Amino acid sequence: MRKAGITGRGLVVALPYFWLVLFFVVPFVIVLKISFSDIDLAIPPYKPLIEWIGKNSLAIRLDLNNYAFLFTDSLYVHAFLNSIKVAFVSTLLCLVVGYPMAYGIARSSAKARSFLLLLVVLPFWTSLLLRVYAWIGLLKANGVINNVLIWVGAIHEPLNMLYTPFAMYVGIVYSYLPFLILPLYANLEKMDWQLLEAAEDLGCRPWQAFYKITLPLSRNGILAGSMLVFIPAVGEFVIPALLGGPNALMIGRVLWDEFFSNRAWPVASAVAILLLLLLVPFMMWYQSVQARESAGAR
Amino acid sequence: MANSGDAVKSAPWRDPAARPYVQIERITKTFGDFKAVDDVSLNIYRGEIFCLLGASGCGKTTLLRMLGGFETPTSGRILIDGEDMTGVPPYERPVNMMFQSYALFPHMNVEQNVAFGLKQDRVPKAEIAERVATMLELVKLGGFAKRKPHQLSGGQRQRVALARSLVKRPKLLLLDEPLGALDKKLREHTQFELIGLQDQLGVTFLVVTHDQEEAMTLASRIGVMDQGEIVQAGTPSEIYEFPSSKFVADFVGSVNIFEGKLIEDEPEYVRIGSEELGGTIYVSHGISAAPEATVWAAIRPEKIFMSTEAPADTDNAVRGAVQDIAYLGDLSIYLVKLPTSKVVRVTRPNTSRHAEAITWEQQVYLSWDASSPVVVTR
C-alpha cells in the first residue's frame, strides 16, 4: 500500500478542483450571501449577514425580501421571460443556420473539412466586443448593408435595423453559431453515411432518409449544441445592450442596472442566483446528453 | 456442394432461348482516369446466385453499386426484368442491397429495421407485422424483435440485414461480402443457410466476395473479375477445372503453373517442354495456340500423385525432395522442391490414420494424369 501524501495523480485531480473552489464555489457563496443581506448606504453597499448582538450572541439575519421583491415587481418576471424567449428563438435560429453548415462540413472531404472548421472558429481570434461593434458598422442607417442596398437600387430609404430585435438576434446568432456547429459537427462526423444509402435502398427519398435517419441519430449533437447556445444566451448582456437598443429588456441588462446604476447589490445577487437556478436544469440536461454521447449510445 | 436450386439444375445460361433476368450491357465506370469497371457485359438468370469474385479494387463492388443505383455508369446500361434502370434512383429500383457493414439503423430495434422498407412503401400495418414476423422466423430471430442492433452478435446482425433486404421481396438482392465479418465456423454454417433461404424465396442473388471458398459454396455461377473486367464466368467447377487464364487458375484455389513451349502440337494431344519443370508435360487433348508460343500448364495440387517409387512413364513425371509438410488433419500439403529449384505444391488426403510416412528431405516422384493439366495461353 502506498502511504498517503502528495502523489502525481492526486495533484492532477486536485488542481482543477482547487481552481473550481477558488473561482467558482467561493464567489458563488459570496453572491449567495449578499443576496440574503440588507441593502445599505456603505461600502460595500450591504449589511453584514452575521452580527454580534450583545454578549455571546451571534445573529444571522437572512433577508428574503430581495427574492420576494423580484416576484412582486413585474419588471423582473418580464425580464426573465423575455430572456428565455430571446435565448430560445436564438437557439432555433442557430439550429436553422448551423445544422446545414455542420452537415456540410461533416460530408465534405477530409481536406476541405479542416479548412471549413478553421473558418468556423476564426471569429474567436478577435474579441467578441470588436465583432459586435463591427455589426453596428454593418447595420447602422448609413452602414455597409444599407449603402450597398441603396447603391444597387433595392431600397431608397435606409432600413432601420440597428437597435431593433432583428439586430440583436443577428448579433446573438452570429456570436453563438460556432458553439452550435462544433458539437453538432463532432456528432455528425461519426455518422455512418452508408445508413443513408441503406435507407434509400429501402425506398426513402434523400430528404426522407435525412428525416428518418440523420436527424434522429444527430439528436445528441443537436441537444448539446442547443444547450451551449441557450444557456449563455439567457444571461447575455453585451449583445442586447449594444445592438438591441433600449427596449431589449433582458435579465443580464437588469442585473447590470441593479448592480452599477442602483447599487442594489443584494437584489442584483438575488437575480443572479435565480438565473442560475433557472439554468441548472438545462445544464444538467446538457451534462446527461454529453455523458450519453461519449458513452456512444444512441 | 449444396448450390442453389432450380437455376443450377436447368442451367439457363446454356439455353440460348432463355431470357436473362438481369442484363448488364457494356457497362463502363470511370473515376477520373481510373477505369473501375471496363466494358462489362453479363446476363444473370432468374433464381441464380451469381458471385462476382475478385481481389479488392477489381471493380466488383462498383459494379454492384451500379446495380443498386448508388453509382451511375459512365456508359452502358442495366436491365432488370426487361426494364431499363438508367436514371432510376435507388429508392425506385426493384433491387435491395445487403451492405457489407450491414448498415443497420442503430436507433431502431430489429423489428423496426426490418419493417422500415415496408413502411416506406405504405404497406398496410397488419401486413407489415405479418411479413416482418415471418421474415424474422425465417432467419431465426423470432425472439429478438425488440433488441437494438448493438445488443446483437455479429451473426445475428448479419441475419437482420438479410431479413431487412429480403422482406421487400426484391427482384434482385445484392449482397456485398455478406459473410465477410463472420468467423470461419459461423461463415460456413451461414453459407448453407443463405442458400436454403434463397431456394425457398426464389430471389435472384448477386454476391460480391473476395473469398473464393465462399463463392464456390454459394454460387450457381461465378464471374472472376480483374482490373474492371470479368475475365471468366462459369459454374464453380468450370472455373476451377477449366480456368481460362493463369490469373483465374491462380486466383481460384491453389495451383502449380509451369511455363513451357509446345514441342508437339497434334489435334488429339500436345506435349509441352518446360524448363521450369525439368521435363515434359503430355496433355491428352488438343489446344489452340500458335506454334512456338509460350504456354502455361496449370496442375492442381490434389491432382498430383506422390510416391517413393519411380513411375514407368517419362512424361508427366518428375523427381524432387520434400521441403516442407503442413498437416491439416483431413489432408496434408507437401512442398516438393524439384532439381530446377521450382517448388511444387501437392496435397494428399489423410485416408488412413497410419499412413506411410513421407517425411522431410525425402526423395519422391511426382506424377499426374494426362488429362489433369490445364493449358492456358495467357
Image (spheres, coloured by chain):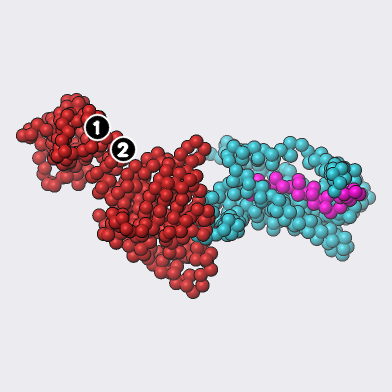
Residue sitting farthest toward the right: A41
Q: Amino acid at mark 1?
A: Ala
Position of residue B226 measured from the top left corner of the image (x, y, whole percent): 37, 40
Residue at horizontal 57 percent and vertical 36 percent from the top: A8
Q: Which chain is cyan?
A: A
In the picture, measured across the screen, residue B195 lies left or right of residue B295, that is right
Q: Secondary structure at mark 1?
A: loop
Residue at horizontal 24 percent and vertical 34 percent from the top: B289
In the picture, measured across the screen, residue A120 lies left or right of residue A143, that is left
In the picture, measured across the screen, residue B161 lies left or right of residue B237, that is right
**Displayed quadrant of residue B159:** bottom left
Indicate the quadrant containing the N terminus of chain B: top left, top right, bottom left or bottom right.
bottom left
Per the rendered image, the range of residues in magenta is A155-184
Q: Nearer the viewer, residue B248 or B213?
A: B248
Q: Which chain is red?
A: B
* Residue named by callout 2: B247
Q: Chain of mark 2?
A: B
